[in-house]
Amino acid sequence: MGGRHIHQRSTPRLGGVALCMAMVLPVVGAVWFEPSLEAAAGTLQPFGFRYHFQQQQLRAWGLLVGGLAMCVLGAADDTRGLRARHKLLVQLLVAGAAF
């Protein structure tokens, strides 16, 4: 019963990396390209992404860093097979930092 179970047939791994990229790339792209759009408009848009990002910058960075940490944890588990207690420890640390 205990221990790590091995699948009888091929099981895809590292699918979380695609989800992580789907979360991170749009945010990074918005931060990267929004200043050039603002410069073209000549003003900081009151309801633009950059405006809200500046207002909530610490939270936004926390979400990005925490999300990336969880992505790295998932990739490490998929490739190395981490112990459950190690995964739980990292998850608690990330959640504690977010709190």
Image (tube, rainbow, N blue to C red):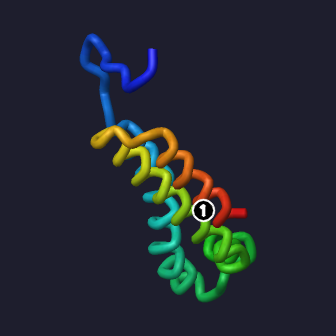
Residue at position x 57%, y 81% in the image: 38
The residue that mark 1 highlights is 63
Q: Picture coordinates of residue 41 (x, y %)?
A: 58, 82
Numbered circles on residues, count:
1
Residue at position x 37%, y 26% in the image: 4
Above or below, 99 relative to 58? above
Q: Which of the pair 67/55 is nearer the observer?
A: 67
Q: Residues within 10 Å of mark 1 (few under 14, many from 20)?
A: some
Q: Which of the pair 11/51 is nearer the observer?
A: 11
Q: Is residue 18 visible?
A: no
Q: Picture coordinates of residue 17 (x, y %)?
A: 38, 46
Residue at position x 36%, y 20% in the image: 5
Above or below, 44 relative to 93? below
The secondary structure type at the circle numbered 1 is: helix
Q: 27 left or right of 54? A: left
Q: Residue furthest toward the top?
A: 8
Q: Picture coordinates of residue 13 (x, y %)?
A: 32, 33
Q: Picture coordinates of residue 6 (x, y %)?
A: 31, 20
Q: Which of the pair 42/73 is nearer the observer?
A: 73
Residue type of the residue flagged with mark 1 = Leu
Q: Which of the pair 45/86 is nearer the observer?
A: 86
* The N terminus lies in quadrant: top left
Residue at position x 45%, y 65% in the image: 29
